Amino acid sequence: MLSLCILGCSDTKTQKTPPFEKYYTTIDSLMQYSFDKGIYNGNILVTRNDSLVYQKFFGYTDGSGQTKLTKNSIFNIGSIGKEFNAVSIMMLVEKGDLQLDDKLSQFDLGLPDWSEKVTIKHLLNYVSGIPQIDYDHVENEKDILEDLQLLPNLMFEPGTNYNYNNNSIFLQKRIIESVTKKTYQEFVTENVISPLQMKNVVFDPALDYPNKVRCFDVHKINCEEVSTSKDRLWVSIDDLNKWITALHNNKLISKASLKLLLQNQYFKNKEGSLGSFHDSFALHLHGGQSWQFEAAFMSELDTDLNIILMSNNKNKSFEIIQSVHNIMNDKAFTLPKKSIYRQIRETCLANIDKGIKQYHALKESDYDIYSFDNPNELNSLGKDLLSEKKIEESIKIFLLAASEFPENANLYNSLGEAYYTNEQYDLALSNYEKSLELNPKNTKAEEMIKKINNLKER
């Protein structure tokens, strides 16, 4: 941990706001350090009570390093863009055009009988029982709808479990179009973008669209940015601040509707449509990732503090934003480290043994530079490999993680999941039991232990 006085001041061309000069100086040192160490490439904005605390632009618009980011650069904001469809739904509810208990079957989407059980409220809270989009077999939104029309059964009864999925987002947009007789983009433009005077915002821009940035990986290779779904939102950091400010000041929906979207209505420990909240709705956090884009914000609703980071080189936005928040509250903060997960990911995908060897070599040579002390790094890598259906490789990473952090319950939970996926039920059971031993409140481990024991009894 560092005290606020350790980092020094750096020169800047940006106008300082005198009441916040002490915060400006420390934030600037933190951000300059993060950029110089290759940890952060992107834009940052901090405001309080509509006054500018800090704003700067670090790095480049793509992996070539030729063009610098500017105030008008537009980024993909990932899951933060899903706030727009949820708020649009609540705008229609407040107008009386929709009710949260309306069923999917009412909207002429050609869905099977299960649509009579799924409500808008289920979709907003990710408890519908509808699975994730099958990205291995769909190429566009027509395929997504046809996949849903052929879905024979739900994963679970609506309201009984939680499953974050993009099918729920897709269906919310189709509901908005069914009710308004406008495209989703037309509705959002007319009811959100234009009224808020958001100037640098666009849906699904072409690669050569003005001010559009490209995302790139740790090797400075630009991403392909191919998507099966439409309506991906790209926005500048100033315009995202307009959205957040309007949302929190009830310019779009009522305070009651905002709270309903902030808190999951079925599972208190799960995210709602707008991310997560803390301290009785005093603190709102949300982040989004897409390809190598990463956007995040943290807002104090009672002090009108907004901290926004937008990056096109996904790395440590969430850690940096927490440090900035600590600075703004006169608390000690930590300096970010490079992600070991991102550094070895491509090697692990190509050859897991070489990837693990690279991990140990970097730990020996650059321990203070990379985040070897964070168990989430290896856990994220293992889950990444598991999602790529590289099950044996994911098991090796989870085993490495468990050996590095033997008291971390979550890692044994992940190892149990990988073994279960690989139909190695005895090993899955022992790891879920270990996870539950370390964390007796781990309900997921309890559920899986029961499930595996039932399988073994058959």
Image (spheres, rainbow, N blue to C red):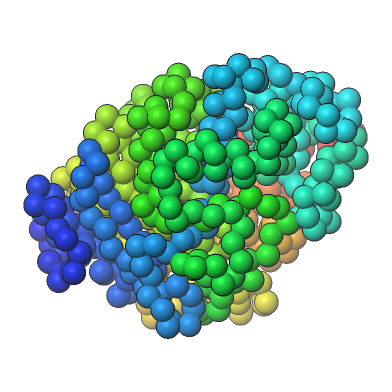
Residue 319, picture quadrant: bottom left
Residue 50 coordinates in the image, percent (x, y) = 24, 41
State whether residue 235 is above or below residue 340.
above
**Could you say which quadrant of the image residue 368 lies in?**
bottom left
In the rendered image, the vertical position of residue 190 relative to residue 2, given as above or below: above
Q: Residue at x 44, y 38 (%)?
A: 195
User: In the displayed structure, would residue 57 be above or below residue 254?
Assistant: below
- Quadrant for the C terminus, please: top right
Is residue 458 visible to the viewer in this orientation of the structure? yes
Of residue 283 and residue 373, the one placed in the foreground of this image is 283
Looking at the picture, how far across and down is residue 12, in whole percent? Answer: 18, 69
Image point (59%, 48%), residue name: 412
Q: Position of residue 307 (x, y in %)?
A: 32, 48
Residue 265 drawn at (x, y percent): 56, 22
Q: Which residue: 68% across, 48% down?
A: 417
Q: Nearer the viewer, residue 257 or 323?
A: 257
Picture layout, residue 188 above or below residue 405: above
Does residue 313 appear left or right of residue 205 in this picture?
left
From this viewpoint, is residue 396 visible? no
* Along the line of sight, the residue nearer the viewer: 426 or 368: 368
Where's the N terminus, which quadrant? Answer: bottom left
55 lies left or right of 456: left
Foreground of the two, 200 or 146: 200
Apparent side of residue 246 relative to residue 172 in the rendered image (left or right): left
**Quadrant assignment, res 348:** bottom right
Q: Residue at x 14, y 58 (%)?
A: 16
Count of numbered marks: 0
